[in-house]
Image (cartoon, helix red, strand yellow):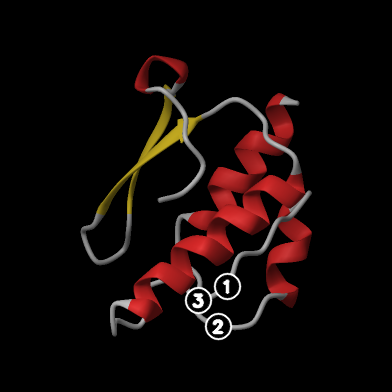
């Protein structure tokens, strides 16, 4: 469940390593309208709850700059700010 994008439309963009040794792969996908992304996220979370599971991710935040990250609640992956900064710099 989610926003369907064919694998050939995804482009590996950056590989990150977190402070705890985790490795992250970030892909760029074609742009989708915000309403589409929010609806797909809500549906995926509802499907998890319907199966008696608590979704791993319970909220979605769309940001336009790294400065907006500090206003978000909850824990952040240590590599999130550099990825957002890099993305904004490419636009």
Tell me residue 76's x, y (percent): 50, 71
In the figure, 19 relative to 71: above or below?
Answer: above
In the figure, 7 relative to 73: above or below?
Answer: above
Tell me residue 27's x, y (percent): 44, 32
Q: Are marks 2 and 1 in contact (CB under 8 Å)?
A: yes
Label located before the other in sequence (2 or 3): 3
Q: Taking 19 as reference, is 73 left or right?
A: right
For mark 3, does the 10 Å Cα neighbourhood hold few (<14), some (14 to 19), or many (20 or more) residues? Answer: few
* Label 2 SS: loop
Q: Taking 79 as reference, is 72 left or right?
A: right
Q: Are marks 3 and 1 in contact (CB under 8 Å)?
A: yes
The disc placed on residue 33 is none
Q: Quadrant of residue 22?
A: bottom left
Look at discs 2 and 3 and give the one toward the viewer. Answer: 3
- Which quarter of the image is occupied by the C terminus? top right
The disc placed on residue 74 is 2
* Residue projecting furthest to the front: 50
User: Is residue 90 visible from the viewing direction of this image?
Assistant: yes
Q: CA distance from mark 3 to mark 1?
A: 4 Å
Label located before the other in sequence (2 or 1): 1
The disc placed on residue 59 is 1
The disc placed on residue 58 is 3
Tell me residue 28's x, y (percent): 52, 29
* Residue projecting furthest to the top: 8
Look at discs 2 and 1 and give the one toward the viewer. Answer: 1
Relative depth, front residue between 85 and 10: 10
Relative depth, front residue between 91 and 11: 11
**Residue drawn at the location 64% of the way across and 57% of the way down:** 39
For mark 2, does the 10 Å Cα neighbourhood hold few (<14), some (14 to 19), or many (20 or more) residues? Answer: few
**Residue drawn at the location 35% of the way across and 83% of the way down:** 54
**Residue drawn at the location 55% of the way across and 59% of the way down:** 41
Q: Quadrant of residue 7?
A: top left
């Amino acid at each position: 469940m989610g926003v369907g994008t064919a694998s050939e439309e995804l482009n590996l963009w950056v590989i990150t390593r977190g402070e705890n040794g985790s490795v992250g792969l970030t892909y760029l996908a074609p742009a989708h309208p915000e309403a589409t992304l929010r609806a797909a996220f809500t549906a995926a979370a509802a499907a998890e709850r319907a199966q008696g599971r608590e979704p791993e991710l319970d909220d979605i935040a769309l940001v336009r700059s790294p400065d907006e990250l500090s206003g978000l609640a909850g824990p952040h992956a240590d590599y999130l700010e550099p990825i957002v900064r890099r993305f904004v710099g490419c636009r």
